[in-house]
Amino acid sequence: MLVYGLINSAVLAVMALGFNLTFGISGVANFAYGAIYVVSGFLTWTLINHLDLPYALSVILTIIIIGVFGGFIYKLIIRGIRGLVISEVIATLGISIVILEYIEVFYNSIRRRSVLNYLSLYGIREETYGSL
């Protein structure tokens, strides 16, 4: 239990430091930071479990992909509204919502397929449980 608490505290500290660093350097309160953090976790999980890549390689690839993704978001959306504080807040909140909804749809379908494959091993059809 103590180790679990220490790990969670370390994760929250890293997130807080990242948000503070981002705001301190760019001056943009990026509310999509947490969503991008979640994407990086799911991306690493996907690379490890579905592409069977080693952990270290998955982490390195995730860092590169998320860096490119963050740069893309900045160039496409943030750069055009720099200096307009309320617009920055609204845009980053919107980005966060879009990212989190995409994760919900995409990874929920993966979970659904996994559950249906597991149930089909035992001859249980989808209609038995309705929509999962």
Image (tube, grey):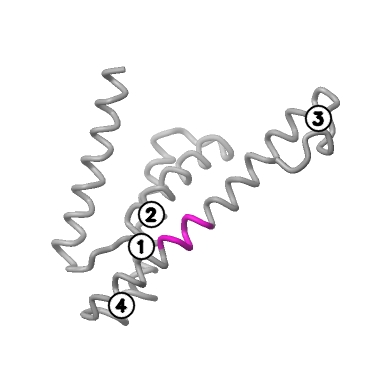
Kind of residue indicated by mark 1: Gly
Q: Indicate left or right for 113 with 72 as reference.
A: right
Kind of residue indicated by mark 4: Ser
Distance (Cα) linking label 1 and label 4 = 18 Å
Distance (Cα) linking label 4 and label 3 = 49 Å
Which residue is located at x 30 percent, y 77 percent? 87
Kind of residue indicated by mark 2: Ile
Q: Tell me the residue that label 1 is attached to.
A: 70
Residues at marks 2 and 1 touching, judged by CB atoms closer than 8 Å: yes
Q: Is residue 53 magenta?
A: no
Q: Nearer the viewer, mark 2 or mark 1?
A: 2
Q: Main secondary structure of the magenta part?
A: helix
Which residue is located at x 17 percent, y 54 percent? 20
Q: Give the class, few, some or many, for how many residues have Cα within 10 Å of label 2's Cα (few <14, many ≥20).
A: some
Q: Tell me the residue that label 4 is attached to.
A: 87
Distance (Cα) linking label 3 and label 1 = 40 Å
Q: Nearer the viewer, mark 1 or mark 4?
A: 4
Q: Residue 122's spot in the image, x, y percent?
A: 81, 22
Q: Tell me the residue that label 2 is attached to.
A: 36
Q: Indicate left or right for 25 with 100 as reference.
A: left
Q: Which mark is residue 120?
A: 3
Q: Indicate left or right for 49 with 10 as reference.
A: right
Task: Return the disc, 2 or 1, that comes first in the chain's sequence.
Answer: 2
Q: Residue 52's spot in the image, x, y percent?
A: 55, 35
Kind of residue indicated by mark 3: Ser
Task: Return the disc, 2 or 3, that comes first in the chain's sequence.
Answer: 2
Which residue is located at x 23 percent, y 76 percent? 85
- Quadrant of image for the C terminus: top right
Residues at marks 1 and 4 touching, judged by CB atoms closer than 8 Å: no
Residue range corresponding to the magenta coloring: 96-101
Residue 30, by quadrant, is bottom left
Q: Indicate left or right for 111 with 66 as reference.
A: right
